[in-house]
Image (tube, rainbow, N blue to C red):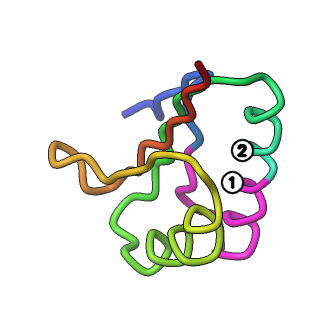
Amino acid sequence: MAKRKPQPDEIDLHGLRHKPALELVRNTLAKRDEKGSFSLTIITGNSTVLQERLFEEILHFTNYTYYVPSWNLGQIIVENIEL
């Protein structure tokens, strides 16, 4: 089965250790924030530990809206809406 190519509005953290994954998320959010409003899907897979680290170490300190959708517990959707 071929691996699916990530879309421009998502990052896939499969196969990354936590430290590089957290850094990738920080850098991606910083780049997106410069452009204004955005929606970003962070694919974490089944790692609830990584999800908790993302919430506690990065997302909690932002003004972004973020949630784990009920239809896919292996991802986090982060949104920033500027009016």
Q: Dot 2: what SS?
A: helix
Considering the whole magenta stretch, tell me its main secondary structure: helix
* Amino acid bearing label 1: Val
Instruction: Determine which residue is flagged by label 2.
Output: 29
Q: Dot 1: what SS?
A: helix
Q: Along the horizontal axis of the image, is 70 left or right of 12? A: left
Disc 1 from disc 2: Cα separation: 6 Å
Neighbours of disc 2 within 10 Å: few (<14), some (14-19), many (20+): many
* Residue 83: quarter of image: top right
**Residue shown at the point (74%, 32%) measured from the top left:** 32
Is the residue 50 above or below the residue 70 in the image? below
Does the CB distance between marks 1 and 2 fall below 8 Å? yes
**Residue shown at the point (63%, 76%) measured from the top left:** 57
Is the residue 35 above or below the residue 56 in the image? above
**Residue shown at the point (52%, 29%) measured from the top left:** 39
Q: Along the horizontal axis of the image, is 8 left or right of 3? A: right
* Residue 15: quarter of image: bottom right
Q: Position of residue 18 (x, y in %)?
A: 64, 75
Indicate which disc residue 25 carries.
1
Q: Position of residue 43 (x, y in %)?
A: 46, 48
Q: Position of residue 29 (x, y in %)?
A: 71, 44
Q: Nearer the viewer, mark 1 or mark 2?
A: 2
Q: Which stretch appears magenta?
A: 12-26
**Is 29 in front, or is 49?**
29
Q: Position of residue 64 (x, y in %)?
A: 55, 47
Q: Residue 63 colored magenta?
A: no
Q: Along the horizontal axis of the image, is 17 left or right of 42? A: right
